[in-house]
Image (cartoon, rainbow, N blue to C red):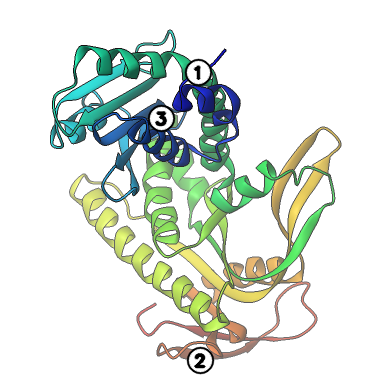
Amino acid sequence: MDLPGPLAWLVDEAGASPGPDRFLADLGGRLVADGLPLAGGALTLAVPHPIVAHRTWLWRAETGTVIEALGFAGGAANHAGRDWLAGLGPVEENTVGPAADRLILGWAGSRAFGPAETGRLRQAARFAAAPLAALAERTALETLLEAYLGRRSAARVQAGALGRGTGETIRAVLLCTDLRNFTALSEATEPQAMIATLDAWFDRVAGAIHVFGGEVLKFMGDGLLAIFPVAGTPAEACGAALRAVVAARAGMAHLDAAREAQGLPPLPFGVALHLGEILWGNIGAADRLDFTAIGPAVNLVSRLEGLCRPLGRSVLISGAVAAETTMPLVPLGEHVLRGIATPCAVFTLPDA
C-alpha cells in the first residue's frame, strides 16, 4: 500500500518514538511537510498519578519547540491543549482510541482547514491509534514508577536495573528526618487524622527536597531518607541539601502555626545531613525488591539524626557537609555515634 509520508511514518516508525514530545513534534513536522497548514499541535494523555490526571504536550510549528502542561486530579476538566491551540488558530481535535479522555490529538491551523484537510487530520488520528496506545502505556508506567520510586530511581528501573544486588556506587548528600513524639501523637489521634497529619508533614519536607533537586528514596513511618546526588561539585549538592532543610523548616513553621490556630500541637522533627558514598540499587527477596541506598554513609546519617533529641537540636550536619559549604554553621564538637567507629564532627544551623 502506497501511503502518504505521515501515515507511513505512523505505521512503520512512530512506535519507536522516545516520548510523547518527540512523537508530537515529528508527526507535526511531517504533516506540515505534506502540505497541511499547521500552526501547532497538542497531545493529551491520561496518566495514573496521585496528583496529576493528564499530561499535555504543546508543539509550535514555527519553532518546533514542545512544552508540557499538567492537568491536576480534582481540578476543572482538562482543556489545556484545546485552549492553547485556540490561541493559535482554528482547531481540529480528535479522540484517539475508545476512551473519550485518555488520548486526545489536536491541531491548530494557520488558517481555517478545508474539508479535505480535516479528513487528512482525522485519518492521521486513526493511524496514530496503535503507536499512541503503546506510547501511552510506556508513559503511564513511567509516571507510576516515578510516583512510587522517584524520578532517578524510576529511570534506573525502566532502563533494566532489575537484578537483585545490582547497583552503582555514587556520592551524594543524604538527608534523614523524622517526627518527634510520633508514637504518643498517633495514640491520641484518630487514624484518618493521623494520615492527614503525616501527609501534611511529608508535603513540606519532600516538597522542599524536590524543589532543590533531591530525591526521596523511601518513607519510613513518620520519617524519610533522601539523596542529593553529586552531579557537579560536592559543594553544589551540599548547598542544595542545606537550602532544602531551610525551606522545610519554614514550611513546617507555617504548618505549626496553622495547627496552633486549630488547637493542635506542633510537629517537632529532627533532620540530619551527611555527604558520602552509597550503593544505590536493588536489595530484597528474590521476588520483591526495593530500590534504595545502603552503606556506611546511610548508617551514619541515621545515627546522626538520632542525636538530635539528646543534643536538643532540630538540625545536625556532619563535618563532611560542613567542609563543603560557606553557609554559617555552629560547631557542636565531635560525637561518638552508635555503631560508627570514628567520632563525627557535628554542626548545626545558627537558629536550629
Q: Secondary structure at mark 2?
A: strand
Amino acid type, mark 3: Gln
Image quadrant where one finds the C terminus: bottom left
What distance separates the C-alpha of mark 1 from that of mark 3? 58 Å
Amino acid type, mark 1: Leu
**Closer to viewer: mark 1 or mark 2:** 1
x and y percentages locating residue 345 in the rendered image: 62, 88
Q: Secondary structure at mark 3?
A: helix
x and y percentages locating residue 159 in the rendered image: 69, 45
Mark earlier in primary sequence (2, 3) = 3
Most foreground residue, 40 or 81: 40
* Residue 183 visible (yes or no): yes
Q: Indicate the quadrant where residue 33 lies.
A: top left
Most foreground residue, 167 or 89: 89
Number of the label disc, if any, that sits on residue 3: 1
Please tell me which residue is depicted at 33% across the width and 46% down the height of the picture: 67
Most foreground residue, 228 or 92: 92
Image quadrant where one finds the N terminus: top right
Badge 3 is on which residue?
192
